[in-house]
Structures are given as C-alpha cells and as structure tokens.
DNA sequence: GATGAATGAGCGTTCATTCAT
DNA sequence: GATGAATGAACGCTCATTCAT
C-alpha cells in the first residue's frame, strides 16, 4: 500500500484493475497524463469513479503502475540477445534494442518520462531499479570483449548514451525542429554504433 | 502584444514586471510551471494578482517570456569561439559550450524543456528559431575541416547529439539513477568529443 | 445535453436539480440573473458549487431551463378556452389569458424577458417557438368571426398588442411611474378589449 | 453629488465630461452597459480611468447622466405640436411623436430602459419626472376634445399605451419573433390611432 | 464490492475602484 | 487636475476525492 496500489484479491477485481490501466494507456495516446481526469479513465474503462479509487489510492498511484506495466511488457517480448561474436555486433544489438523498446510503447514512455521529471518522488525506487537493470545488461553485453577496467569505466556512460540519445527523436519528434525530424532513425543508429565502437577502441 | 506580453511604459511597471519574472524563476526551482498558480507568482513577487495580468495577457504568456529571458541571458555571456585550428578543437569547443550553457540557467532550461513538450504550440516558433541557430553554428564550426558532403550529412546528427546528450545529466540529474549521478561531466564531455571526432573521421 | 442540461438519473439528483432551480427562482425575485452568482444559487439550494455544475453545463444553461419551467407551469394550469360565441368574447378571453399568465410567475417572466434582451442568442429558438404558438392561438381564436383576409392582416398586430401591453404594468410595475401604478388591471383589460374589438370592426 | 455626478467647474472639465458621455453613448451602440468597462469608456474618450472617476462617483452614476442626456436631446429637437383641430388629429400626432422619439436614440433608450429595470433605484426620481411630463402632455393634447371626466379617466391609460406599445417593436425588434419583425411601423401606428380614437369615443 | 452524486478547495481571469506619481 | 499602475474581491468553472446508497 506504500505505493498507493491496493492489492486486488478477487478475480473480478483484477480484471477491473487491468481494464482501468488499459483505459489509461489508451488515453495516454491522445493526451498527457495531467490532462486526463480520473473520471475520464473510469469512463473509458467502463467502471465508476469509486471503483478506480478502490484500486488506486489517488491519481498519482497510476505512475508506479505504469512503470510496472512497462516492465511487464518488456518481459512479454524479452530481448533475445542472439549470441554475438564481436564487440561491434554487441553494440549494434544494444543500440537497436534501445531503439526498438522506445518505439514500442512510445506513449507509455512519454507519460513516464515526463512524470518522472515532474514528480520524481512518485516512482523513484522503481525507476532506479529499472535503470540498474539496464546498466547490468550493458555490462554483460560488453564483458566478453573488453577488459574489466575499461568496462567498469565506460559501461555507465554507454548505458547512459544508449538510453538517452533516442529520447528526443523517438518520444518527442513532433516537438523537435525540422532538421531533427528529417534525421533517419536507422542512420542515427548506425552513427551511434560507429561512435560507441570507436570509443571502446580508443 | 501579439505574444501576450504587454509593454510596460513606466519605470515602476518595469520593476514590477522584472519582479514577477524573477518570482516565477524562483518558483520554477521548486516546482513545474503547471504546478505554479498565478496567485503564487503574484504572492512571491509581492504584487497583486491583477498586476500580473496587467503585464501578461494570461498564464501562457509566461512561456515566451521565459524563452526570451533565456536568449537574453545567452547574450549576456556570449560564447566566444576562440579560433580553432583542428577538427578536434572544434568539437571540443562545441561540446563544452553545450555543457556550459545547459549548466548556466538550469532551471530556466528545465521549465522550458518540459513545457515545450507539454504544450508545444505555445512557443513553437521561438523554439524552432533557436534550434535552427544551433544547427547553423555547428555547420560553421565544422566547415573548415570537413567536406561539404560530409558536413551536410552529419551536422544535423552532431547538433542533435550535442544538444541532447547532456540534458538528462545536467537538467535532471536528481531523477537519474545513481550510476548516472556518478558520471563525471568532464569525462562525459571527453568521451563525447572522442566519439564525434571518430564519427567524422569514419 | 445539447442545451447544456445534464440528465439526472437518480432520485437524489432530481431532487437536487429541482432544489437548484427553485433556489434560482427565489433569487430571481430579489435580483437579476446577471447579478446572481452560481455560488449564491448553490448556497441557497444548500448544495455545493460542483453539484450545480453536475446538472448544468454552465451558468447560461439556466436560461433554457427557466423557459422550460415556464412552459411546464403553463401546462400545469392550462388555459381552458371556454367556447366563445362572439368576437367580443374571444377578445375578452385573449386579453384575460395574457393578463393571467403574466401575473402568474411574474418573476420567471421578468428573468426571461430581460435575459432574452440581454443575451438573445441563448434561448433564441425556444423563444421563437413560444411566440409562434402565441400567434397561432390568436389566429384560431379569431377564425370563426372574421374574414381570412382581415385575420391574416390583423392577427400579428393583435398578438403583439396582447403580448406586449401588459408587460410594463405587470412585470415592472414598481419601476413604473405613479399614475401607471394606479392604473387598474381590470380596467386596462376592458379598455384593451374595447380597442381591439373596435379595430377588428373597423 | 447625491446622484454621483461631480460638478465640473472648469471649461476643460466640462469638455472631458462631455467626451466621456459621448464615448459611453458610442459604446452603447455596440453592447450593453453591463458589458462596457470603465476602462473602455475612458479609452474611447481618450482620457485616463482616474479622470472618469473624477467626474463620476462610480459606474452607476452614468445612468442618471444618460437620462439627463435623453432629456437634453428631447429639448434640442422639441416636439412641435401643430395645432390640431380634431381628436383624431391629436391622437395621430401623439402616436407619431412616440414612435419618432423612440426611433431617434434607440440605443440610449435601450440602455436606459434595461437599466431602469435592472437597477430601479439608480434613477428612480428622474425617471418618475419624465413620465409625469409625458402624462401632462397627453392631457393637454386631449383637453380640447373630451370631457374632463373622460380625460382624467383615460389619459393615464392612453399615455401608458402610447409609451409602451412601440417599445418591443422599436427597441428590441431583433429579438422579436419573425412575425413581429414583419409588422410595419406605419401600419402599427395607424392601428393604434384607430384603437385609441375608438376608445375615446366609446 | 460497486456506484456515481456530491463535495469544495483551488484555479485562471476580470474589472470597479484607489492613489502615488 | 490628470494619469494609469496597482489592487483584490469576486466570478465561472474544474476535478481529485469521498461516501451514502
């Protein structure tokens, strides 16, 4: 309950809870979280407002849920790291995974991204955890190909770049200036790969 | 008046207008623009609500003002491009300028950054213009060192990276995961320089 | 919902809706609609402001309601046209009906009358319809006694006079000069009847 | 000062006062008094808000001024009663004068008419006086042609009808139903004359 | 458990009025 | 006297939250 989500014990409850979350996700495709009223969510979900509040302590409690949902989705379509034989392969995969995941569930990411920044406290812990996972994935990916020393030194930066560099392009392309909108995703991915490989070889 | 800002004619007015903007900037250090009420701004500025509305057509009129303020500040401490003799120097300067500008007026940037994404329409044109300037600066910087072809192809991407890669680290460091917080800005700058130079040489 | 009135589904809602309308009617006895705040209505009705807005889209939505209410009341005490055998009888009835209806629900009429003039667009259609009914009633009343030609020519004028001539006396008697206040309603009705009959015989 | 109008002693003041009133009259042609802000009046008059308040105690103080202005205008173009030789002539003149005066300065009348009803207390006395004049005019007009008894009995009613019956048609024709809009003013005048003459002969 | 009517604090905004300049 | 910047009460309206049914 610390996170504001009230455990559902019955099957019916769980269904409703899912309905509500899906309703929110649907609405997030149209507008920002702050512009979505609880009533609108209830409406879209086909339940009463009170029912929403039986599952969620308050409106803020949706954010952690959305994070949870993101993790869940990540698991549903797990990133299968095919065996890679070269550093270049590894980096290529890393970049393409980052790109794919962001494109998948763009709206979810946007909502979470903006709200983490608007209300950091709401989901601090979950967020932290997710990012930690990302880092260790990067470390695992690099391990076979570079020295421990280099890995420790560069993995955080590489994880940072991989997680950051596409945000503007993918999540906020509409707000981006014209020339950013013209940048091709795949070209970008290639450039980034080139750069990261060069960095690791430097 | 087209932008919703009403010209102040008297000395007293200008003072109050300044007070109001400073009040807003102060509040922006604590919370997001959407969470700041006009009454709160007036209160912080020590003026009445009506006084705020005498200077600003409505709450939205603050956003353009913030952008303006950003430009103004940028002019106050102009970026002096010392003459650069190598591509590496040029990139080094580019990266360090991006970093510096972002650190300077972090709060202003945060407010604008988030609001551009939350309400793109409000300051679309100004924003566009600023970004265009950034691109042409990058192009000028690269011109002496690389072929026209390469420049046209890579300048937008480089501008994009330079403008994007520090955002998380500088503007939202608190919300970033622990290992990102440990990343050293200067190390980051060095890495990025290395990467961009490598890309341009590739 | 097109008219801004939200349908009430529960018994409790209907009660409140009624309470709100009655509160408004009460307040209309004291002051004009434009001088009555939504908060005052809510207060008088013993409900919260939000409750008012749950039933009425906005303040303007009250005007159509008032018109509706007027029609409703008109139905409650329907005008029973006893069979009339002479033109004089018909006119007598017409005038006395106009007088009676205006006296009944004086306040309602006042509010509507003034607001139709202050904000014509708000209830234009309903109003139009009501007036049309009035005209056709007059035409029906006259049909047996005068030629088609005369009826077509004079009915609109007669309807106009019948609908207009009592307004000052009945709705705004307090604002009228002393000698108007001394005019006796029944005398007036007699005079008007005399005049209209004479006109029709001319 | 009881009426809220502050006496102007200097020529310059009087000019400004006149400017202000004319500005108000101009604005009244476009919108209702309640929708005209003091600032707008000052603006139109080319003076400062404070100047308006130096001449008028508050916004309500304009109403009496408007009444005054109406009287003034009435004097400027005095109704010249040509000598009448029959009762019919007298009534014809009465009706046509009422019609003319109302058409002249329609906007002024509208503003006053509505505001007298919205805020009766503001101009009660002046209004009363004007109406009394109207009655005595009617009495004078009728004196030569009918018995004292009849005159005393019918004059108030006739004055009432003459002053009332055109209001809807002339002042609020736009809000009136279609068939009222189609009524011809001159036809109306003729009908009314016919009716009043018949009444007096009855 | 579920419902949705009810709540009321809070928002952005207006404008009659005041008063320092 | 004239100015117009400053005031702040009041308005219409929204919406997260509660709770009687």
Image (cartoon, coloured by chain):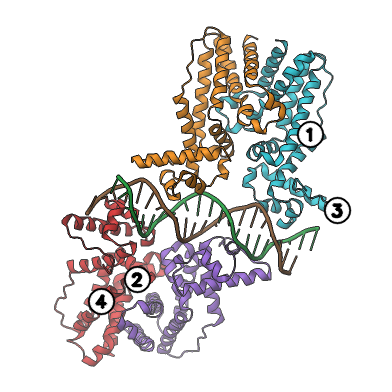
Chain colours: A red, B purple, C orange, D cyan, E brown, F green
For mark 1, what is the residue? D74
Instruction: Name the residue nearer the viewer: B124 or E1.
Output: E1
Residue B196 in sight in this render: yes
Between disc 1 and disc 3, whose residue precedes?
Answer: 3
Q: Position of residue C185 (x, y in %)?
A: 63, 21
Residue at image x 55%, y 76%? B72
Circles 2 and 1: CB atoms closer than 8 Å: no
Q: Position of residue B137 (x, y in %)?
A: 47, 78
Residue where numbered disc 2 is placed? A116
D150 up-or-down from C15: above or below: above
C130 relative to D68, above or below? above
Q: Quadrant of residue D154?
A: top right
Q: Are marks 2 and 3 on the same chain?
A: no
Residues at discs 1 and 3 in contact (Cβ within 8 Å): no
User: Which callout, 4 or 2, points at the residue further toward the start of the chain?
Assistant: 2
Q: Which residue is mark 3?
A: D10
Front-most of residues C17 and B183: C17
Can you give x and y, in whole percent of width and height, for residue C99 in the image? 57, 22
User: In whole angstroms, how far apart are the C-alphas of marks 2 and 1?
Assistant: 72 Å
Which residue has dot 4 on it?
Answer: A129
């Amino acid at each position: 309950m610390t996170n504001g989500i009230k455990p559902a014990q019955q099957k019916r409850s769980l269904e409703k809870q899912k309905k509500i979350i899906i309703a929110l996700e649907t609405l997030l495709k149209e507008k920002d979280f702050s512009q979505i009223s609880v009533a609108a969510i209830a409406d879209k979900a086909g339940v009463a407002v009170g029912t929403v509040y039986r599952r969620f302590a308050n409106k803020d409690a949706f954010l952690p849920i959305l994070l949870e949902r993101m993790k869940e989705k990540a698991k549903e379509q797990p990133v299968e790291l095919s065996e890679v034989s070269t550093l270049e392969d590894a980096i290529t995969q890393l970049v393409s995974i980052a790109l794919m995941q962001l494109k998948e569930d763009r709206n979810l990411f946007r909502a979470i991204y903006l709200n983490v920044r608007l209300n950091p406290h709401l989901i601090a812990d979950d967020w932290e955890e997710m990012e930690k996972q990302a880092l260790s994935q990067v470390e695992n990916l690099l391990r076979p190909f570079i020295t421990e020393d280099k890995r420790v030194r560069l993995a955080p930066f590489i994880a940072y770049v991989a997680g950051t560099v596409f945000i503007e392009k993918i999540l906020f392309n509409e707000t981006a200036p014209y020339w950013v909108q013209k940048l091709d995703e795949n070209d970008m991915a290639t450039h980034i790969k080139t750069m990261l490989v060069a960095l690791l070889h430097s």
